[in-house]
Each structure stands twice: as structure tokens, then as C-alpha cells.
Image (cartoon, grey):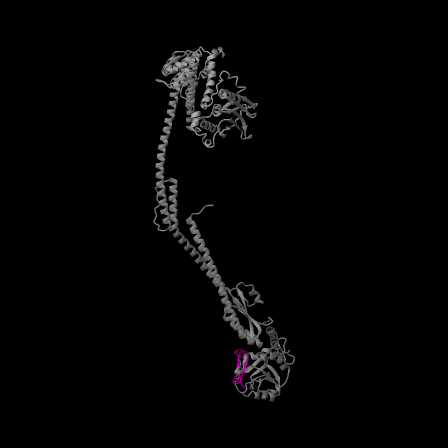
Amino acid sequence: MRRVARTVLSALILASNMLVQPASSQGSEVAPGYTENQVKAAFVGHLFNFITFPDGHAAEYICTTEETAFTQNIAAVLAAAPTLKVEIHIMSAADIYASERCNVVLAQTLTASLISQNAQRDVPVLTISDQPGFARQGGMIELERRPSRVGLIINRARAETAGFTLSSKLLRLATIVSTAGGESDES
Amino acid sequence: MKVKGIRQQVSIIAMTVTGVVVALILIVQLAATLQRDLRHITDQSETLAQIVGDNASAAMAFYDPAAAEDTLATLARSPLVLMGRIHNVDGSLFAEYRRDQQDDISLASVDNPAAVLAGHMYVSKVVEPLVIGSTTVGSITLWINTWDAYLKIFTSIWLSLIIWVLGIVIAYLLAERLNRRAVAPLHDLSEVMITVSTTEDYSQRFEHKEDNEIGTLADSFNQMLARIDDREARLRDAISDLEIARDQAEQAARTKSAFLANMSHEIRTPMNGVVGMTALLKRTQLDDQQQHYFNTIEKSAQSLLMIIDDILDFTKIEAGKLEIKNSEYSVRDASAAIAEFFAEPARRKNLEFIIDIDDGVPATLIGDSGRVRQVLINLIGNAIKFTDQGKVALKISVIGDDYHETIRFSVTDTGIGLSKDEAPSIFEEFFQADSTSTRQFGGTGLGLAISKQLVTLMAGRIAFESTPGVGSTFWFDLPLHRTLINPFMSSMRVNSRDTLSNPFSTALGNSTENGADSDDVINNAMQQEGGVGASYAASEEPLRWDAKVLVAEDSEVNQFIIKELLAIYGITPVIVENGQQAVDRFLSECFELVFMDIQMPVMDGVEATSKLREAQKQQGINAECSIVGLSAHAMAGDRERYLEQGMDDYITKPIDIDELGVLLKRLLKPQSSLMLWR
């Protein structure tokens, strides 16, 4: 069973890896045959393999304020990867703030500032968003839409201050930035 | 195929074994080295693939082929990697690295480099999965150039070849050393052995310095030679002793032969006088008592002659000088003679004497009739001797098949027979059944021994069957040699009581002398034969010749006897005492016949004969005169020797009157044949 599951997961990861929406509304393709949301959802799934949570914890709850095609793709990716044991939950910003279980917050358009504020809490919460400027505004991981692909922008200082350890492999692929007003550091 | 020497074989074996073993070791070592190096390269490549793959995993996870190719580019630092590829889990290419040029492999502008590398012998492929977390997301494949590993092996092969050759050379040198220490001494030892066996010089020894197994072998060999040498010396001494003994024995045999010859001569010479005188005496008028005395003298003389003949025969056989003379003879005549010979003895004992000849017996045979007759006389004489009543039968038959025909003479009697104890020794010389029988029957005990020897000389065999109190059958088989024209005889059965009684009617006595010994029987028969001749001589007028005869004889007795015997035939000889006188008379007078004694004073008969022959040949004196040897020399070869020395005939003493008559008839002119037998 486990071997079958691995095979299915591999196929889904591949699919998610390649899921890039046809550039109908967003412009050109980021990967052949896949939508941008599919690609970004796969990226979210992969992130947990390259980020170490503090105190031996692992990603458990991805909390977001609204259900979109992006969140649906994430849910599909997570469902295909049961070993991650990560769930995505839709809830209000207040609930997200009040929740002790939400250790990953996916900040979409309307909740960006909230997520930013929430991120100021002592509880280590990994904040992810595809909103431009999210990392520079205090977010940790930003999924950036580039001309032919999806890239990563990481606020390394914010994430490490919160106790997260980022893999060098991940950092090598990403653009490293600091909070607005700070010096930009790309790699 | 040429057989190689030990030395060559040792060298060949040492080099072969060393070459094979070293070659195997080197091959195994080279194979192990190659395998180890290839394994090492593979391990290195797998590790490299895992590291590079791990580094490229993030790039793959976040779909960043450029970053992945940057990671793959680090493979340039490893000169073994010809190409590296990262594939998605479905096999599609994600990122690639190619080394532009290495050795003779160029991938820079190749559309399908993997196919190029797959066809290359020294390229191996390493594939490692790319795993993120616990999920395989693809694979990394490295194409590794293993040429260096093979190149290292090729380099090692040259080194191995040098080691291999070196090993063989060392093995050869060691073998040569072994040869010098072990094989060379063996070779030298074998040379000594060959020399000893060729020259038979057992005094040679093998010098050596070895104190090992070869030394032990050489010492043993030398000891063996010493023993053989010693044995040879003793053998030579023994042979020398044996040669001396042989010479002495031969000398003794020659002395014995000479003695027998002399004895024969010396005994026969007076016997000539006795027999001659009895023959002459028989021609005179005797009263009954004188006739009885005469018969006793004649019988004793014949017995003595027979014993002498037996002893002479036995010594001839023992000396191997008795020869068998084959010629044609008539079975019927021989049988008739036998019948005549034993008619009287059988009649005297009132025995029936039967001769039975089968249909298949040829009328004439080839063989020595005299010796056959001698054997038959012995067997039949014994049969009559030991048979008091009943019959004695001679049966002649042919047995065997067409390829191995033999003629069998069997003599059956109804006599006393032989016990089982006597049977094994019956053919031994000087055998007598027992002392009692010796006294009862007499005899020398040589008859059967001589018979067996004669039969053996005639390539036959003799045997007997006997039942005590019932009788005996003695038989002997001889090879049957048929004459070219050889009609079969019609069967013949002669019974002494019937058909043979008449011819001997004058000699058949009416007395029955049971207990007469076999020699007596034969003597009686001989006397009867002689009696026939004597009676004939006394009652019949013999041929008479008016011939001039010269007799050379030194013995006065013999002079008288031959003078009287010749007188019977009307001849008055001229008698001289030695050879010289004979030659003198021969040269001055005419003679038709000369009787020449062999042993005479002044000049012996042989030399005198030679001179007479010379005179006949060169001067034509008495050219047609015959010379007859006259001697008591009766040893084997005497007759032949004297005939070779120029004599026309030869008669032995004592002179038989009938034999003399036959000889005169043959040698003298037929003018005298006007005198007829009456």
C-alpha cells in the first residue's frame, strides 16, 4: 500500500510540479501544460521539505481566509501527500489569529496585512503568500510570478527570527530580501 | 615419438607448472584489480550522483532547470564523468551536463549522446533516484568513463607478463639446479649400468659424492655389482670345474668306447674261432653224445654273441651312435621271417604262435626292418619265455586317421603277466621281474630297455598292458611311411601249428622245454635259423668258385677258419699275416678277391687297402679285384668308415658261413654260377 501511495504521490507531485495555469489571464506559461496556481500549490507542498520548524515541530495546519483555486490546488497536493500530514483550513482572520494550531498562514489578497500582523505573534507561524511585496512587508515566503516561471522570494531574517531554518538548497533557488526599508539581498 | 630424458622432462614440467600457476594467479589478480577498480569507480560515481542529485533536488522541486544544470555543472570537476542527466519521474529530461571532449569521446555536438555512450565499451552508467522527503521525484544518471581502470589493467598486464616470464625463467633455473644435483648423477649412473650390461664387466663401480637417496641408490647398485662380480667369479670357477669334469667325462666316454671297441674285437676274435669251428665241426660225422656236446657249445656261443650284441647295442644307443636306416621292406617277408624264427621255440613249448596282419597294412613299408625285427624278436621272445601254455600272437595293424597313420605291432601272450609293482620298471635297463625270476628265466635285462630305445629312435612309442596270471600285450607304434606304389596286403593269418610247421619240420623238436629263458628262446630260434643254414651247408652242396683269393689275417685261428670256410666254396686262398705282405702279394700276383683284416701288425688293413687301391688306379694291377674288410670291429660306424676308405664290403667276425656265401656270389665272377644250389 505504501509503495502504491508513493507512486501516486510522485505522480501528483510531478503534476503539481508541472501545474501551471495556461497564461490566459496571467500571461505566458510558467511550465508546459500547467497553470500558475497548480505550480504554486506544488511549491507550497515542496516548501515543507526544505524548511525546518522550530522546536521539532512540523507543518500541520495551513490556515487561510478564503477558498480559491489556489487553495483548492493546495488541498489537492496535500491530499496526495498524506505523509506530510498537513491540512488546510479556511477560517476568518480573527480565528486564524486566535488559533494556536495554525502554524502556516497562507495570506491571500484581502488578508495580507492581517497575516503580517499575525506574524508578529510569539507563536512561530510560517507565512506564505503570492501577493507581490509580501516578503518585503514582513512575510516570510513569497511566490513570485516571473515571466516564464514561478520564483521564490524569501525574507530570510524574518523566518530565521521566528525560529525557522531554511535549507541552503532552497535559499540557492530563492531571492532573499529583508523587511521594507532594509537592504535587498538576492541570490 | 621421441622419449625425452628426465632432465628435459623435469625442466618442462617445472616451467609448465610455474607458467600455469603464475599465469592463473596473475589473471585472477588482474581480474580482481579490474573488478575492484570498476567497483571503486562505480561507488565514487554513485556517491557523486547522490550528492549532485541531492543538491539538485530543490531545483527539481521548484522547477528550476537552470539551477539544476548549474548543479550538474559541478560534475566538470570529476574527469571520469562524461555526461550527467536529471530526469523527471516519467523519464523526461529535466537537466543535462556534457563534457565536451574526453579521450576519443566527443559529445559536444551530438544529438543523442546517450546512444553514443551506450555503444562505447569503456563507459558505464550510474543511476540514482532523486528523493525529496520520502518521495522519488526523478533520477540522476551519470555516464562514467572507465577507460582509466582498463588502462591500469593493460599496464598491469605488461608487468604481469614480465613477472610470468621471470617466473618461468626462475623455474627453469631451479630445474637446472635440480638436474645438476639429482638427474645428472642418475644419468651418470645409467651410463655405468649400460656399460656394465654391455661389457659385462662387473668390476666397475659408480663413484659419487651424494649423501642422499641417489647416494643410497648408487651404494646399493655398487653392492649389487660386487655381489654379481663375486657370483660371476664363483660361476666361472664352477664352469671351469664343470668343463674339467666334462672333459674328464668325455675322456672317460672315449676310453669306454675304445674299451668296448677293443673288448668287442677281442671277444669276437676268439668267438670267431669258436663259432667257425662249430660250423666246421657240424659238417663232420658226430655220434649222439658228440652231437649233444656240439649243440651245447653252439648254443653257448650264440648266447654269448647275443649278449655281446645286446651290450654293444646298448652302448651304441647310450652314446647316441646308433643310427636308424630306413629302406623299403616287405611286411609279408618280415612276418614270414619272424614266423620261421619262432616256430621252433613255440613248438617246443607247445604254444600256438599266430601272426595276424590286417587288411589295411601296406605290402611294403619304409623303415629300418632290422631294428623292427630286433624289437619284435625281443617282445615275442619274452612272450614265449613267460608263457607255458596257450598262445602267443603278433598282430600288425594300421591305426589313426589319414593324417596321422601309424602301424602297430602288438604281441599278446597268455603267460604269467606282470604285477603292478613290476610294471613301472619294465623298460628300465638291467630290470628283472625279481631275483627268483632271474634265476628261473635268466637274461641280461637289456632286451626291453633296448626295444624302448629303438622304438623311440624310430619316432614311435612302446607300451604294454598286463594282468598277472592272465597274460600281457606289448605293443609299439611306428609312423607309417608308405611307398609310392604301395598296394595293401590282403589280410594274412599265419599259425605256426599249421602253415609254418612244414618248412621247419626238420628242425622242430619234439621236446617241450618249459622254463627256457628268452635268450634261450631266441638262441634256439637262431640256432634253428643257423641250423637251417648249417643243415643246408652240410646236406646241400654250396656254390663253388675257382677263384684266386687273398686273405690278410694275422690270427692263426682265424686263418684256419677262413681257410676252411672258403674251402667249402671250393676256394683255396693265399694267406698272408699282415698288410705289407698283402700289398707285396697283390702287386706280384693276380687276385679276384681280397679279405683284409683291419687290425694287423706291420701294416693295418686300412693302409694296405689304400695301397692296393692306389696300385689298381695307377698301375691297373688287379683292377677288378674286390676288397672286403674282415674284422671283429663291430662298433657303430665301423662299416661306413671302412667302406669310405676303399673297401667294397665289410663282414664282421665271427664269420657266418651263409653270409660268406652270399658275399662270394655277389663279388666273384658268374663263371662259378654254373654250380647250382641243390
Task: Report x, y in % for residue A95.
Answer: 60, 88
Task: Report x, y in % for residue B137.
Answer: 58, 74
Taking A10 as reference, is B417 above or below it? above
Taking A178 as reference, is B626 above or below it? above
Residue B18 visible in the displayed image: yes
The reply to whether the magenta stretch includes residue A111 is no
Looking at the image, which is closer to me, B626 or B542? B542
Residue at 56 percent across and 65 percent down: it is B118
Task: Report x, y in % for residue B420.
Answer: 47, 32
Q: Which residues are magenta?
A: A155-180
Looking at the image, which is closer to me, B658 or B423? B423
Task: Report x, y in % for residue B439.
Answer: 42, 25
How many numbered badges does the structure rendering display? Answer: 0
Would you identify the image quadrant in which residue A174 lies? bottom right
Residue B625 visible in the displayed image: no
Residue found at the far right of this picture? A24
Looking at the image, which is closer to me, B413 or B529? B413
